Amino acid sequence: MISAVRGTRDILPGEIERWQRLERVTRDVCERYGYLEIRTPVIEREELFKKGTGESTDIVQKEMYAFTDKGGERVTLRPESTPSMVRAFVEHGLEQHLVTPKLFSLGPMFRYERPQKGRYRQFHQLDIEVFGIADATLDAEVIEMASMLVRELEIEGVDLVINSVGCPSCRPGFHHALLEALGDRLPQLCNDCQRRAKTNPLRIFDCKVPTDQPTIDSLPHSVDYLCEACREHFDATKALLTAFGLACRVSHRLVRGLDYYTRTTFEILGENLGAQNALLGGGRYDGLMRQVGGPDRAGIGFAAGLERLVLAMPESGETWCPDAFVVAIGSEVRQPVHLLARDLRHAGLSTLVDYEVRSPRAQMKRAARTKARYVLIVGSDELERGEVSVKNMGTGEQTTVARDDVVSRLVGEKCLSK
Ligand code: HAM
């Protein structure tokens, strides 16, 4: 038998109910904060991520599903959706057309990473982005929204971490300080770090090699090298977070694995998730739109890993069960049974029937297994009298109802039970 591709997962009935709850809550939270939904293609030009996510990142260097298509064009499955959202915003002139520059999107991403718990090669993200607003109050609002989402999903034991990575005017000073602090210890770091020192020293903080960590922990902190404007921006962000009553921790290691960040970066980490503990992460990227060929507009957003949110959400026990199961006694009532099922479905009730002519006992057993709320029994006697037997599977009570009234009766009971 052919199995699924390594690092991809089937989301099966039984688990899908949590995903559906997650998507419901997500859409509700996005709506409350004024975000509009957008869906972009899964496949994009490779160049978009080389320019956007950044040539020096692990994503572009090692993890993209990039290939030459049959027309000779370099394309890739998207590893993240921020550059796609930026592209779509510019390509469709959304700045002029939308009432708000706040967008959200849900969908699959692809990264060729080593699979483990919470890390997959196809995974899903909620991505939210806001364009054209540089003010620090938005940074705090975006972070507050991320916390609110996690809270609405009833995820407990989380840690909010923030940092500021500065802007193009203060970043070179920080890069210089990093290289100076590394000094002659650089050759002892891993090959990736030596490459990073040349291309983008900030990326050294992405290193996961255990023996490099003591050196990396001793490096200077970006917040100590911020220019006046970045310092004020970071202070204003933290002040509003404090006013919101949100506890957060400043971590100088939080530079995030993508090249476009400027100023604020943040993550929400979950306990009990093991090594892959980032539930969501994001930050400000004021130069990205221009970097990919668009106008010079600010940007900020975050992406949450849906697999990780699902892992962290508490069990809710919610599984699908039908409103009704219609049991046929004898093959001569098969057609009336299907007509009744059709009427129930048209009235909005989820309804199952048995397609084989099995014994009433076998059908009752199957109805019980599906956890149907009501079992409707149709035999030739009932049919002759124009009636249906209705068994409430919760109370065990069985009554006879006129065929003409049974649909409205069940619809009424469903409304009452809501
Ligand atoms: P990211 O940190 O690369 O940021 O990914 C965001 C989230 O996606 C992570 O915190 C994690 O929950 C989830 N994630 C990432 N990789 C995997 C994986 N291989 N398997 C499962 N989950 C994963 C971004 O993607 C940025 N675009 C976020 C952003 C939006 N920044 C600004 N706007």
Image (cartoon, helix red, strand yellow):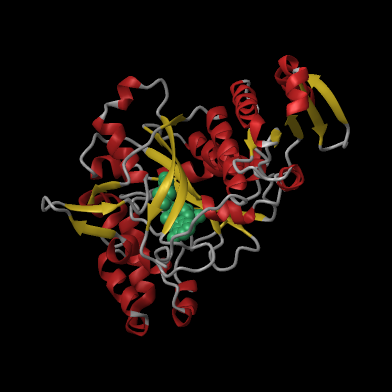
Report x, y in % for residue 379. Answer: 74, 30
Residue 6 at least partly seen: yes
Q: Please state the total of marks drawn on the protein image.
A: 0
Q: Nearer the viewer, residue 57 or 332?
A: 332
Quarter of the image for residue 1 reads: bottom left
Residue 155 appears left or right of 79:
right
What residue sits 42% from the left and 63% below the top?
A: 4
Residue 273 location in percent, x, y? 61, 63
Q: Residue at x 39, y 52 (%)?
A: 109
Q: Position of residue 226 (x, y in %)?
A: 42, 52
Q: Which residue lies most toward the top here?
A: 404
- Quarter residue 290 falls in: top left
Q: Residue 252 or 412: which is nearer the viewer?
A: 412
416 lies above or below 223: above
Q: Where is ligand 1, by quadrant? A: bottom left
Question: Is residue 265 toward the left or the right of residue 57 in the image?
Answer: right
Horizontal arrangement in the rendering, residue 270 relative to residue 73 (left or right): right
**Rendered-image quadrant of the C terminus:** top right
Going by the image, does 266 lie left or right of 154? left
Residue that appears at 26% across and 47% down = 44
Q: Position of residue 193 (x, y in %)?
A: 34, 74
In this picture, is 171 found above or below 201?
Answer: above
Along the viewing direction, whichever of 252 and 32 lies nearer the viewer: 32
**Which quarter of the picture shows residue 346?**
top right
- Decide if residue 160 is in sight here: no
